[in-house]
Image (cartoon, rainbow, N blue to C red):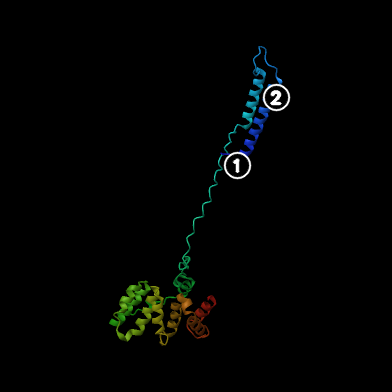
Amino acid sequence: MPYNSNERLEREARESLVASDLSAKMKQWREQSPPPAGGGGGISPLRILLVLLLLGGAAWLFWPQKEQKTPPLQEQPAELPAPPQSPVPEDIKPVEEPIAQKPSTVSNRYLALAQSNYRSPDFASDIRGEASEGQNALNDARLALAERRFSDALIALKNTPSEYNTDAAYLRGHALFGQKKFPQSAVVFGQLTGSIRYGEAAQWYELLSLLPEFEENKSVILKKLKRISEDEDHAFYQEARDLYQSL
């Protein structure tokens, strides 16, 4: 690298001083030294050696030194910016866990209560021999119910004459209950609650048909159950009391 202005001036001043001093010394040596033998004038070898030493020292002193190159500083790698995070759209809502569906009320303990409290009538004992054509249809339905062939019972009841509608409806309600079609059986039994022959039995079986859907029919069930359990003359009085305690 080139010297700056201050270094250059200092170097020139040193060179000037050395040159002046050297010139003065040489002049002094010439004046003080006797002429060599043989009559010729000149400079002795010793003085020449001293001059060379002075010149060599001055050259060494003022010879420009090689500057040591300072290794360039390694640039520190700039920190990479963090990758931008994708903004979450406001209109996207977190996925919510699906709410567990409650099991069908038909498959709960109320269904078990309904089935355990159901007592099938003795349908076979109501079969009559040498009956009319209408009675024969009822007998076929009674026999099918006794054998738990509920679909056959419903088919037989389709051929029942209108004068036997009440009997046919009562048997139909039991066939639907046996098929676990509880809402339909509740409707059929509900239509017979005022019947003279089947009224009290229909009230009880209607209550049992409503029981599997207890949460939906709770107020109606408790009202009907309370009425039966408070009527000591009711045919299903004791059954109603036991069921009321179970609920």
**Residue shown at 62% from the left, 32% from the top:** 62
Quadrant of image for the N terminus: top right
State the count of labels: 2
The image quadrant of residue 23 is top right
Residues under labels 2 and 1: Cα distance?
A: 35 Å
Nearer the observer, 235 or 118: 118
Residue at x 38%, y 76% (from the top left corner): 176
Determine the secondary structure under disc 2. helix
In this orientation, does residue 129 appear? Answer: no
User: Are discs 2 and 1 less than 8 Å apart at CB?
Assistant: no
Q: Is residue 197 left or right of residue 109?
A: left
Name the kind of residue labelled 1 in the image.
Ser
**Residue 9 vertical position relative to residue 89 in the rendered view, above or below:** above
Q: Is residue 213 visible?
A: yes
Residue holding disc 2? 28
User: Which residue is identified by label 1?
Assistant: 5
Amino acid type, residue under disc 2 in the picture:
Gln
Determine the secondary structure under disc 1.
Answer: helix
Identify the residue shown where x is 31% and y is 86%.
163
Looking at the image, residue 216 lies above or below residue 23: below
In the picture as drawn, the residue positioned furthest to the front comes out as 39
Which of 62/122 is in front? 62
Residue occupying image coordinates x 70% and y 24%: 28
